[in-house]
Image (cartoon, rainbow, N blue to C red):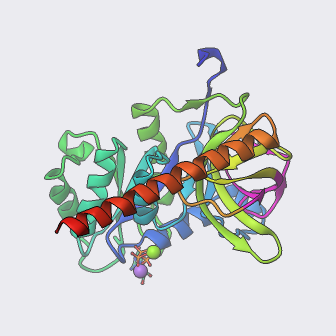
Amino acid sequence: EDEAELMPRPPVVTVMGHVDHGKTKLLDAVRSSDVVAGEAGGITQHIGAYQVHVEHEDQDRAITFIDTPGHEAFTAMRARGAKVTDVAILVVAADDGVMPQTIEALNHAQAANVPIVVAVNKVDKEGANPSKVMQQLTEYNLVAEQYGGETMFVEISALKRMGIKELLEAVLLTADAELELRANPEKNARGIAIEANLDKGRGAVATVLIQSGTLRQGDAIVAGTAYGRVRALFDEYGKSLDEAGPARPVQVLGLSSVPRAGDTFLVTSDDRTARQIAEKRDAIERNAAQARSRKRISLEDFT
Ligand code: GTP
Ligand code: NA
Ligand code: MG
């Protein structure tokens, strides 16, 4: 890759944590904190991912949030070898402390080498004990800056929408300190399908995260074993776009079928190439499935 063509891109963030610790509430709070969302009347569609803008060190910075249940999305995508997340926000309820799925979540992030920012949530509650959370997590190599470590802990109340700006700042500081997030916006787009469904009127609707390049209306694309031409592109406000660049999540219409979460997509030179790649992938998957079932049968015969 030509260094000169690499431009800074926003970090892509996944929210993880134990059940009921406030992941959904946090995603709601983040979304409503967005200046642009405010201007647009705050009407956001659920497209599985969205971008917010924050003012950070006198600059307008974007952050992309993956909005699907963090844990599931993360594991499903990792299972297909897709790396989507740059930074993980680990939500820990300050009244409950570290719980089994807190540990599971941080294990996933650490295994994938994804830096973690800890959101110590529900600090508005009686019985909230943020320092206990900090102390508990040192056991898992998440050592707070206050304790001489490198992990940022931010106290928040997702319910009262407190500490959200500080949390977003911590995400940017962590990304800037630990990652070199750059992508070439000039190339044909490549990325990952985040979620997809079949819509009665519109056909296959896929939310994709563009990881490099720029995706444009009319592009020939292949996503997993689905292929087609981009008929329309929409942002999280349902606004139609002509094009979208790196780290931007967009809804895409025009695919022949519904891709799966974690499928990679790419723009090809023409429709025919997109279709050929899709058919090749489909054949490979069929062969692998057949091989698996043959193996099962022969094992059963043997035992
Ligand atoms: P699952 O998706 O089921 O794992 O839960 P979650 O992590 O998405 O938690 P959710 O956002 O649904 O919040 C769980 C409960 O905690 C809800 O009743 C929320 O209203 C409450 N809650 C979330 N954040 C806060 C907070 O900051 N303070 C208080 N007091 N309650 C909160
Ligand atoms: Na819940
Ligand atoms: Mg939830």
Residue 8: % across, % down = 60, 30
Instruction: Give the answer, above or below, for where 106 lies relative to 296.
Output: above
Residue 73 at what x, y percent from top left?
46, 61
Instruction: Identify the residue at image location x=59%, y=48%.
Output: 281
Name the quarter where the C terminus is drawn: bottom left
Extreme residue toward the left, this view:
139
The picture places residue 230, in percent across and down from the top left corner, at 81, 51
Residue at (58, 41) in percent of width and height: 10
Would residue 126 be counted in the magenta stretch? no
* Picture quadrant where residue 253 is located: bottom right
- Of 256 and 21, the residue lying toward us: 256
Q: Is residue 115 left or right of residue 7?
A: left
Give the quadrant of ligand 1: bottom left
The part of the image, by quadrant, that contains residue 114 is: top left
Q: Is residue 214 left or right of residue 190?
A: right
171 or 202, which lies in front? 202
Span highlighted in magenta in the image: 230-256
Q: Nearer the viewer, residue 238 or 272?
A: 272
Which of the 4 image quarters holds residue 129?
bottom left
**From where the camera sits, is residue 133 visible?**
yes
Q: Position of residue 93 (x, y in %)?
A: 31, 70
- Towards the viewer: 300 or 16: 300
Residue 234 among those drawn in magenta: yes
Left/right placement of residue 45 relative to residue 287 reads right
Q: Farthest residue to the front: give it.
A: 301
Residue at (53%, 43%) from the top-left corner?
Answer: 11
Q: Looking at the image, which residue is at 26% across and 53% down?
A: 107
The quadrant of the picture occupied by the N terminus is top right
